Image (cartoon, helix red, strand yellow):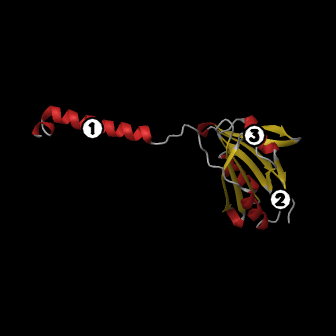
Amino acid sequence: MRRFTQGLYGYAVALFVCLAGAGLFLLVTPQSRDEHIPRLDYSITVANFGHGVPYGVWAPQQDPPGWVPNSNRIADGENGAKVLYLGYATAKREHAMFAQSDEQPAAGFASRMANSDKAVGTQQIGGVAWEQRFREDKNQRSLVRVLPDVTLVVTGTADWPELADLAGRLQQRPKG
């Protein structure tokens, strides 16, 4: 019995037993190769946000195909304003977020969400002009639309067509 617990032979046997046990464990453990992004329904969050703001809330009428809504929250903005955030994993598995608030000044909110205050162009989406902003060091693209009662920002690492797809699906829901 002593030869199994001493020397190089004993070390090799112990190593083999450990590796065999680990291999057996990996063999019987169920493994999933499928990607799993948690899907979070944002309808209750949007409804709750609508009860706390004095304007009709904007939200996607329908999510873009292949997109997964994976985060949503209501937060306090500057000067007592409320902010609604809806986050997505896009079909290309990039990040996109829609944020809206009646925070004043609107330019401050838009600049914080876009991480930039410099417009790089405009884009027509559904017959409406959206301001484009780009922050190269973060690979962040943003579409900004300032309305009289609310500021809308669609932002993320998604490309311009994906962000435009989300922006084009936004519709204002009646206050009530």
Residue for point 75% across, 57% down: 43
Q: Position of residue 162 (x, y in %)?
A: 73, 37
Q: Residues within 10 Å of mark 2 (few under 14, many from 20)?
A: few
Question: Residue 144 or 11: which is nearer the viewer?
Answer: 11
Residue 17 is marked as 1
Residue 156 lies, in percent from the top left, at: 66, 43
Q: Earlier in the sequence, mark 2 or mark 1?
A: 1
Q: Which amino acid type corresponds to the residue marked 1 in the rendered image?
A: Val
Q: Which residue is mark 2?
A: 149
Nearest to the eye among marks 2 and 3: give it.
3
Residue, far front = 1
* Mark 2–mark 1 distance (CA, rounded to whole Å): 69 Å
Kindly indicate the quadrant of the structure image that contains residue 74: bottom right
What residue would you read off at disc 3? Answer: 65
Which amino acid type is shown beneath numbered disc 2? Asp
Above or below, 102 against 63 in this view is: below
Q: Residue 24, image x and y in percent?
A: 37, 38
Quadrant of res 92? top right
Quadrant into which the C terminus falls: bottom right
